[in-house]
Image (cartoon, rainbow, N blue to C red):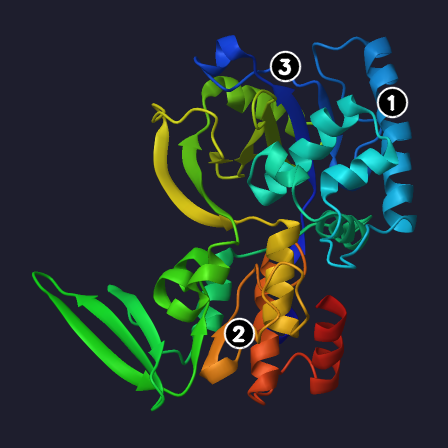
Amino acid sequence: MYDHLKVSYHSQPFLFEFSKVTRLNREQTPYDDSPYFIHSSNNHIFPPIRPSTMSILEHIVEMMYLLLCYAWYTVCCLLISPRHSRDGRLCETYMEYLERLRLPRYFVDCYLLPLMSAVTTCSHQAVLRFPAKDLIEYKRKTHNQLHFTVSKGVQEVQEKLAVGLNVQLRSRVHEVANDGAGIRVCWIEFGNDKRETKERIFDHVIFAVAPNVVGSLFAPLSSMMARIPTIQVRSIVTKRSNSKERRRLQVQSISSKSQRIRLVNWFEGEGWTQSDHEQTSGLIVTTCPLKESVQANELHSATFTRVLRTPESRDIVNTIFDCRKSPSLPQSKTWMSGDGGIWLVGGWCWDGMVLLEGCISSAMRVADSLEVDIPWSDRVTVNAHITNRI
């Protein structure tokens, strides 16, 4: 798709620093300059960089331990498939799958869960409740693959995708209903000193929002969408302090092209991982900050909705998009995407982890159903892709 849009992109190596906080310094500051391991994506730096607080012997022992655990985990992911739904039972969770593999608890808690928690922006316990298939398929498809990023920023992609679209801002939809004559969409337009309610009839409506929003706007889906869990995730942008600048320069002297992602782990309770992504511009984007208070060097903050996965929610999503009999839903006819001209798209609208790939896959599914040409893929390929994914 990027090649078709002529969007430039390049491979981007990363350095992942694993560190942890205690109850004492969590109340003061989540930053700790003592990582317990530094991993380079695709092992582009080998041997791994030794943390300053770790002796050579300790570092060697840690590397050998991780090598054995990760090799066993990789082999299992490639050869042992998670258990699927059958006989009225839901699929296997990630926790159940890891217990079958008999992986050491230290490896799971300190390495596997922080990495997956950073990807899914949710707690460690929420990751363990995910369908095992999601994370195993993610591992299989990303194994030994490079990381890519857009060269000129996301704005370039947005501008190309928005060409020819009639975008209406300062508006909020509050109801979507199918009344027989068409699909009635009601929304509020916010002006300078007034707000105006409007409505219009459409032939098709495509929801590209989180399931909790779908449920609040479209009554027939309210009960189903309520069973798909979501959380609010906070992300902030801060400036790099002088001490962090010195540390960044020290790391980049080893790998000048690598970007640093610091995973700060809090292991108590549900378990959380704060992700600090250092940009080349000198800014740090922090996702899931452990401190909820405003920081002195905070420039901007935002929240977004993260859709979580469970065996039950996976079952519901697959039923909506694949008309399967669901062990967790009544056996009467279940609403499917496309019924009455209502369609669902988004990162959660496929059988996999909630990622941007899900947005593309679900959008291609709608385009194919409406017989809209997909320039970067022929129709046969799209149908095969959808069948394999769902």
For the point 70% across and 42% down, which residue is it? 13
Q: Position of residue 362 (x, y in %)?
A: 59, 70
Dividing the picture into quarters, in which one does residue 322 lie? bottom right
The residue pinned by badge 2 equals 335
Q: Which mark is residue 109?
A: none
Q: Position of residue 309 (x, y in %)?
A: 60, 50
Quarter containing the N terminus: bottom right
- Is 173 left or right of 152, judged from the image as shown? left
Residues packed near mark 1 inside 10 Å, few (<14), some (14 to 19) or many (20 plus): few
**Front disc: 1 or 2:** 2
- Is 366 left or right of 192, judged from the image as shown? right
Residue 41 visible at all: yes
For the point 73% across and 42% down, which residue is it? 94
Dividing the picture into quarters, in which one does residue 178 lie? bottom left
Q: Is residue 60 above or below residue 128?
A: above
For the point 89% across and 48% down, which residue is it? 80
Quarter containing the C terminus: bottom right
Q: Position of residue 115 (x, y in %)?
A: 67, 36
Instruction: Give the spatial CA distance, label 1 vs label 2.
Output: 49 Å
Residue type highlighted by circle 2: Trp
Mark closer to the chain start, 1 or 3: 3
Q: Is residue 336 above or below residue 158?
A: below
Residue type highlighted by circle 3: Ser
Q: Which mark is residue 34?
A: 3
Tell me the element at label 1.
helix
Q: Nearer the viewer, residue 17 or 319?
A: 319
CB of mark 1 within 8 Å of CB of mark 3?
A: no
Instruction: Name the residue furthest left.
Output: 193
For the point 64% across and 40% down, which residue is it? 127
Instruction: Give the spatial CA distance, label 3 vs label 2.
Output: 52 Å
**Front disc: 1 or 3:** 1
Tell me the element at label 3.
loop
